[in-house]
Structures are given as C-alpha cells and as structure tokens.
Image: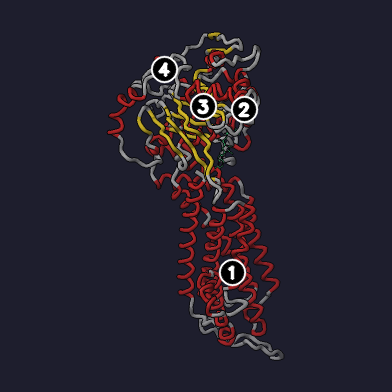
C-alpha cells in the first residue's frame, strides 16, 4: 500500500482569502451506519464518533487547606468526525487539561457533559473507541518496531486473529505510516518523528475512531512536524476524529488543520475552521495584520498582549464555544438531538464489556513474553545480579572461612547469618526502588489505552523475576554455605535456602511498594529508612526476650526476625551435635543449645517462620498492588 498524504485542501492567506487546492473538501454529514472507517481494510471496522461537550469545567485541588483552582471555565465545543482538530492557546491556557477531560484521562474535578454521537458519554464505551497519545513517546525501547507492533497486536487482537493476519495488519500500518524500513530497528534508536509515528502505529492496531494527541509535534524539526500532521490529517480523512493540542504552529502547519479550538485562560476564544479564523478576527474588529501568521496573531491575542477586553470580545463572539457559526458549512452540522435520535438504538444494544479486548490469560502470556525479550536484550542487570551474588558469597566465604562448624566461632557465625539477611534484603529492595519508577510512565500510558489490566501487568511482573531470583539465591547460598563450613546436611541447607529466598521475595515486595509510591530520589531515602526498624526488631542486637513489652509488636512485623530465627534454627537447631573445638581452645558455645538459649531462640520454629514470611509476602504484594492502583488513578 502506498503512503498517501494529501496536500492541504485550503491555504489560508493573511489577507483572509483562501486558495483551494485540488484535493477533495470534506463536508459535515450526519453519522450513519455507512460512515465506517474504510482504510486499513484489515482492521476491525467501527462507526465514526462525533464528540461534543457542554459547559465543561475542571477544578484542580491545590492541596490541603490551599483551596481549589478552576482551570476550564464552562467551555463548549464540537469535534465532528473526519476532521483534524487542533487545540491551540498560549502556555497554561488549559489545552492539555481539555484533552485529558475529553479523553477520559481526568476523572475527578470535572463538571459539564461530554457527548459521543449525541449521547452522553459512557466513559468505558468511549475509551474502547479512543486512544491517547502522550507528548513523550513512552515506548518499549529495547524492542524493535516490529516486535512492539506484534506485542500490541497480541494484546489487542488476541488469538482470535491468526498470526498471519496480524502480520498483514502490521505490514499495512507500517507501510502507511512510512515505518516499513525501520521494522527491525529498536524503538530506542528511532528518530523523534519515527518514534511519534510508532506511537500512532501502535494505537492504530485496534483502529480507534477517536484519537487524542498531546503536542504531537513538540521536539520535531519542521519537516517531521509537517509529515506528522499530514499523517494525522490523512487518518482523519478516513473518518476518525483526531484532536491534538498544538503550541504555536507555523503558517504551513496551521493550514493543515481542519478545525481549530483556541483557548485562553480556560475559555474558548475561537472555534471554527482554519480558513474562517481571519474572517472571524475581522468580524470582532481585530483584523490580522497583513503577512502575519494568523496562528501567531490569535495566540498573541489569547496571551492578552492586545488587552483583556479583546479576549473577552472574542469569548463573547464564540459564546465560549457554544457558537458553530465559524465552522465550514455549519448548516450541515447535525444537531446533538438528531445525532442522539440516530444513535439511540445503539445505546440500548450496548452490553457491559471489559475495557481490554482480550482475555486476562492472553494479556499475561504476552506481557511475560515481552518481559522475557526485554531481559534478553538488556542483560546488564541480569549479569550484575549474578556477579553480585557470586562476589558477596565469596567475600563472606573468605571472611568467615569454616566458621559454621567451629565451636569457638559461633558468634562470628551468628553475625554472618545476620549479614546474609542484610544482603538478601538490601539488593532486591534497592533494585525495585531504582528500576520500577522508570516503568510507571509506560505503564500509565499502556494501561490507560487498555492494552492490559493492571492485575495482569502485576502478575507478569511478579512471575517474571522468580526464576532469576531463585537462581541467584541458590548460587549465593551454595558458595557461602560451603565456604563458611555450615553443616553439610540437605535438610539444613534446604531450610536455609528457603528462608533466604523468602527474604528476597519479601524485600522485593517491600521495594516494589516503595517504588510504586515514591520517585527514585525519595524511594532511595525511604527504603533504607523503613528497613532500620526491621533490623532493630529482628532480635539481633536486642534479643526478643529483652525487647520491652510495649515494643514486642515490632518483632511480629519485622520479616527479618523470622528470617533470622529460622536460619539460626536451621544451623544450630534440630539437635545439632557438639561443635568441633580444638583441644587448646576454650569454646564457650560448643554446645548449640547454649547459643540458642543465649539469643533467646528455640531452634524449632522453622515452619512458623515460613508461614509468617508467607503471610508478610502476601500482605506486602497485595499492599503494593493497591498502592500502585492508587498511584495510577490518583494522578487522574
Ligand atoms: N493538578 C493541577 N493543580 C494545579 N494547577 C493545575 C493542575 N493541572 C493544571 N494546572 C494548571 O492549569 C493550567 C493549564 O494547564 P495545562 O497543562 O492544561 O496548560 P497547557 O495549555 O497545556 O500548557 P502547555 O502548553 O504549557 O503545556 C496551568 O496554569 C497549570 O498550572
């Protein structure tokens, strides 16, 4: 399929005239059954959507006792299908906020009504037809363009579409977007314009009929900007409603938009066709100076450079977006009531459905596959984890050489057990705190665009790390256990390793909980800070017997306490015989019961410790999920 990017149909001249080019001019017509998105023949076909909004307000909370701030002040608007619509305005005018409200990304602090085809928007149904492309391209940079597309095809189309058909869909989209040459290039190595096109391509897989794009041209050079806007225009021509915010477009870029919606400080200054902007300015007695880019001029007006009274005049003329007078052929614009009549029967047929298009199992499988490819591509962290575990194991081995079977080195061995716990706690926890926050941006975008449910993302995140964690833990335990001369009995080694592994999993969950809530800087501070009480209550410095009664609760919630108690039991419990002691030495703790009594442990609590660690693990994993969910929704 060829790349077909039409030239602009009308060129706006600064004298207010428009020059018609040879491409077809699209008029508004009522949305009907036949208004299907025709291009991308292989994609699921859907009806076009006419988006309208009335009296929309958005009030942001400024924080505890700081009150609220109204950002959008009861604006109205109409975004018909088949049009490329640009939301323009100076910085801080409320463009992104309006886009967030219309796309359904913002869910709190909103007033007014948003309509889809004349019917009050049902948020979930609307989200199934739309997508949101963020300003920063949150892509899987380690995956190639084709892999990215295939993963999304698997997530969105599932197994009901055969692999061959998916390949054909991907090829069609990549060719249309001019990305076929880069199919085998990693997303991280693409140019800015290519990344933007890939972001669009990924969303096109399930053929959304409404596309919201936040500043798609930011960071692109003029030729990539124009290529990107032309592409959006072409996608709009296929029946989609494409709404994007745009900062200050050049005259060439401006003319590519069909409709513009100009905001100034949360009010609508102008709503209408691009070519009607100049006549509109003349009508409000603010003619655009000759040879001046009308887009620049209207932004200058919106900034208040020519006085607040002029802004008010324009807001009054458009009736804050209620007026459709400046649309191209407004007489063809169907009324909301008419749209409602035409689409009422669809509302009745609507069945509640999941936001995601495929089964949970399919999402889980695909996310695991993606995580596997990513870990194969970037093996640095994997190697580092293996190397750290080998090095620390060797270091402990050398430092505490054969301390485990020596009656004179029991206290050293006790210190070693605590150090092992420190190692098993700190590295997994810090790894999660440092890596997880960088995933949040991508997760927010993909989750909002309904690629997968949070549950399945979380399940794949939990499962995918298990094999490497087990491998690293066993590797470390074997080296350290053997070199430090711990009792060479399978059951003791098994108990020791099981407790190490559970400590690793609990620490990972603890790190995930912190990483889900805090950014890297705050998390790096909070992680070790919150770990200090865990160490204090582990029974290492102050034995559990000597803990003041009012602090006893601390020992029940410290997961290190169960790790320490269990490991000491595995090494010195189970009726271990008298330890080796050279004749010339005095070995105070050569009877294992003596050390157990000294540190107030019985050595037979293994199963209790395992159960306690499992309960803590379950609790922390659940809490981390709840916090992650809260984090994802709190920003909205
Ligand atoms: N959650 C919030 N709390 C407080 N103020 C907010 C919040 N969200 C947005 N604002 C304010 O609302 C105004 C509009 O913000 P918005 O991001 O929509 O502007 P914009 O037109 O997209 O600007 P830019 O082009 O610079 O991105 C700004 O003054 C911003 O500071």
Marks 2 and 4, the one that precedes in the sequence: 4
Q: Nearer the viewer, mark 1 or mark 2?
A: 2
Q: Are marks 2 and 4 in contact (CB under 8 Å)?
A: no
Closer to the camera, 382 or 448? 448
User: Vertical placement of 217 versus 285: above or below?
Assistant: below
The residue tagged 4 is: 28
Q: CA distance from mark 2 to mark 4?
A: 31 Å
Q: Is residue 150 visible?
A: no
Q: Is disc 3 placed on a helix, strand or loop?
A: strand
Q: Is disc 4 placed on a helix, strand or loop?
A: loop
Q: Is disc 1 placed on a helix, strand or loop?
A: helix
The residue tagged 1 is: 533
Q: Is mark 4 within 8 Å of ligand 1?
A: no
Q: CA distance from mark 1 to mark 3?
A: 55 Å
Protein image colouring: secondary structure
Q: For the view shown, which residue lies furthest in the right direction?
A: 584
Marks 1 and 3, the one that precedes in the sequence: 3
Q: Is mark 1 within 8 Å of ligand 1?
A: no
The residue tagged 2 is: 303
Percent position of residue 141, x then y: 59, 40
Percent position of residue 515, x then y: 57, 54
Residue 182 occupies quadrant: top right
Marks 3 and 4, the one that precedes in the sequence: 4
Q: CA distance from mark 1 to mark 4?
A: 66 Å
User: Vertical placement of 560 versus 24: above or below?
Assistant: below
Q: Are marks 1 and 2 in contact (CB under 8 Å)?
A: no
Residue 268 is marked as 3
The image quadrant where one finds ligand 1 is: top right
């Amino acid at each position: 399929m060829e790349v077909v990017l039409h030239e602009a149909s009308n060129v706006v001249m600064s004298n207010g005239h428009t020059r018609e080019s040879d491409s077809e001019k699209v008029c508004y017509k009522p949305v009907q059954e036949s208004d299907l998105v025709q291009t991308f023949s292989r994609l699921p076909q859907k009806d076009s959507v006419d988006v309208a909004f009335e009296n929309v307000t958005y009030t942001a909370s400024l924080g505890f006792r700081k009150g609220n701030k109204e950002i959008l002040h009861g604006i109205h608007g109409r975004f018909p299908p088949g049009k490329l619509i640009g939301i323009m305005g100076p910085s801080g005018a409320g463009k992104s906020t309006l886009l967030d409200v219309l796309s359904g990304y913002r869910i709190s602090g909103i007033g007014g009504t948003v309509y889809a085809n004349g019917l009050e928007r049902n948020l979930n149904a609307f989200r199934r037809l739309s997508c949101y492309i963020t300003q920063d391209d949150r892509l899987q940079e380690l995956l190639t363009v084709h892999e990215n597309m295939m993963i999304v095809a698997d997530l969105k189309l599932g197994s009901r579409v055969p692999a061959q058909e998916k390949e054909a869909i991907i090829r069609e989209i990549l060719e249309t977007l001019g990305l076929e040459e880069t199919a085998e290039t990693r997303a991280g190595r693409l140019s800015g314009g290519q990344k933007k096109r890939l972001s669009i391509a990924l969303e096109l897989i399930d053929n959304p009929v409404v596309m919201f794009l936040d500043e798609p041209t930011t960071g692109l050079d003029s030729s990539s900007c124009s290529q990107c806007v032309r592409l959006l225009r072409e996608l709009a021509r296929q029946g989609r409603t494409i709404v994007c915010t745009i900062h200050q477009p050049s005259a060439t870029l401006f003319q590519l938009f069909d409709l513009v919606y100009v905001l100034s400080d949360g009010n609508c200054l102008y709503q209408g066709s691009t070519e009607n902007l100049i006549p509109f300015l003349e009508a409000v007695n603010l003619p655009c100076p000759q040879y001046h880019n009308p887009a620049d001029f209207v932004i200058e007006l919106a900034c208040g450079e020519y006085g607040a009274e002029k802004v008010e005049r324009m807001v009054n003329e458009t009736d804050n977006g209620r007026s459709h007078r400046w649309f191209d052929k407004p007489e063809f614009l169907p009324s909301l009531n008419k749209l409602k009549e035409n689409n009422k029967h669809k509302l009745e047929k609507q069945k509640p459905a999941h936001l995601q298009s495929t089964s949970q199992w399919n999402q889980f499988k695909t996310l695991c596959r993606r995580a596997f490819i990513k870990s194969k591509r970037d093996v640095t962290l994997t190697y580092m984890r293996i190397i750290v575990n080998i090095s620390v194991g060797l270091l402990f081995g050398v430092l505490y050489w054969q301390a485990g079977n020596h009656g004179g080195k029991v206290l050293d061995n006790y210190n070693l057990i605590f150090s092992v716990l420190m190692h098993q706690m700190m590295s997994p926890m810090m790894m999660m705190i440092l890596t997880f926050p960088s995933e949040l941006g991508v997760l927010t975008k993909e989750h909002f665009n309904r690629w997968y449910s949070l549950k399945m993302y979380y399940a794949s995140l939990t499962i995918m790390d298990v094999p490497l964690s087990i491998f690293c833990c066993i590797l470390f335990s074997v080296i350290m256990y053997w070199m430090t001369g711990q009792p060479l009995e399978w059951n003791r080694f098994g108990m020791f390793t099981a407790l190490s592994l559970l400590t690793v999993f609990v620490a990972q969950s603890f790190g995930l909980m912190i990483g889900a809530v805090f950014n890297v800087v705050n998390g790096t501070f909070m992680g070790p800070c919150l770990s200090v009480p865990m160490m204090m209550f582990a029974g290492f410095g102050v034995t559990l017997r000597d803990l003041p009664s009012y602090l006893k609760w601390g020992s029940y919630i410290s997961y290190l306490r169960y790790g320490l108690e269990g490991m000491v039991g595995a090494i010195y419990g189970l009726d271990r015989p008298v330890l080796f002691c050279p004749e010339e030495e005095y070995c105070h703790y050569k009877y294992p019961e003596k050390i157990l009594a000294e540190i107030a442990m019985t050595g037979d609590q293994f199963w209790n410790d395992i159960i306690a660690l499992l309960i803590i693990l379950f609790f922390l994993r659940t809490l981390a999920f709840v916090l992650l969910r809260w984090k994802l929704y709190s920003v909205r």
